Image (cartoon, coloured by chain):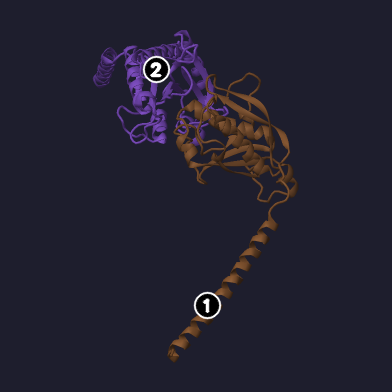
Amino acid sequence: MPVRHEIWRFSAACLGVLALAAQLSAQQAPPAPAAPPPRFVVVLDAAHGGGDSGGRLANGQLEKALTLALSVRLRSLLGARGIQVVTTRESDAAVDPARRAEIANHTQAQACLSLHASESGSGVHLYASSLAPVRPARFAPWRTAQAAWVTRSLALEGTLNSALLQAGMNVTLGRTSLPSLDSMTCPTVAVEIAPELGPDKKVASALDDPAYQARVATALAAALLEWRSEAHP
Amino acid sequence: MIPRHQKLLFGILLFASLIMGLTLWQLRERAHQRLIAGQDSAPTSAPEVAPAVEATLLVANDSDNSLLAQARSLPLPADPGARARAVLGKLLDLYAAPDATHPVPGGGPSVLQVFLLPAPQSGAVKSTEAPSDDQQQTGPQLAVVNLTGSFAANHPSGIQTETLTVLSICGTLHANLPRVTEVRFLVDGKPRATLAGHADLTGTYLAAEAVPTEGAHP
């Protein structure tokens, strides 16, 4: 009998220790992590660079320099508004069109803007890919990967158009086929800035006018904020 | 007294002079005959001019990013390839004019050739058989437009201007040769990545998609 009693006492002690350990571990366990905030990343692709100087603009300015300046300005505006920005180039470096698409695709961005400049036309030209829309698939051909995103790209183009019109700018919309654009797997729009012409067809705002560049960049930043609110209400 | 060797030399020189005179007279006669023969082969009737037919040109406009169909009466050859080249030449002549709505230097000579080929079959499974004569006569065609390197080098750079050039060429080809459904581009006979840094020239363009509906923009 005393042996059986000892066994009962030992078992009760073990259970007590286990219960205490469980209670302590429950008290020390960290709280469950809160759900991370939705990630919103924008890719800015300053076209051309290095040996590829792009078009020659008025006053001898090169397209590659203007697109880089606009990219830097827009990155600052978006960064100040808490939007994460990834750029395809930060200096006068040559970046292959395929590499630009790789950067955008690895980022899994919610918006990609390919920045261009031209002396032809007037105001801001917005271009989405001319690929026919297809349903998203696990694997997509590299040259036509954008096809699964065309519908979203057209929606982004509409948001950019609204913001630019609200800023009083002349906007033209279109579809085109650009080597890097067609390989991007994100909502992508090519933004081409041209001089703003007045009613008399004379240049009202030149491309090298810092105030004009600032107006375009501010309107684009406002559009991307609107796009973020639509994507993550 | 004249020495004998001098008499002999005189005789030889006289004989040589006669021979040379005779030769010259014969050469003159031959030249005269040739001249007469050339005059005879000169054309006696005016060269035949192809009859003027109605052609449709899709003319680009940079100010509103549009393509506008314009009807023109042009003397066009019967051969489809030559006809395509003539129509595109006229289109590029309009762009090279001083008051062009879509200024691009180069003009008509910028189109070296237009090759018309049976369009490749679409779909995953392609037939290995050559297209029949009937298919070649009536089936869809792929137009390969060979442009000059100077046209591409001097083309203004920009998405809008390059896209409008490409689409207006595709649309003009389809409007005048409805069997042309696809268009590809070469520059100096070789593939080229872009026209002037933007518009992709490596792919195949669907010609019908370039033809705008009423009031629409490309």
- The answer to whether residue B122 is visible is no
Q: Position of residue A95 (x, y in %)?
A: 36, 34
The residue indicated by pointer 2 is A206
Chain coloured brown here:
B
The answer for which chain carries disc 2 is A
Query: Mark 1 is on which residue type?
Result: Ser
Question: Residue A75 appears at what percent x and percent y?
Answer: 34, 19
Task: Residue A130: name its quadrant.
Answer: top right
Q: Amino acid at mark 2?
A: Ala
Quadrant of residue B206 within the rendered picture: top right
Up-down: is B216 above or below B184?
above
The quarter of the displayed image where residue B184 is located:
top right
Q: Residue at x 50, y 43 (%)?
A: B191
| Residue position marked by numbered label 1 in the rendering | B17
Is residue A130 shown left or right of residue B172?
A: left
Quarter holding the N terminus of chain B is bottom left
Q: Colour of chain A?
A: purple
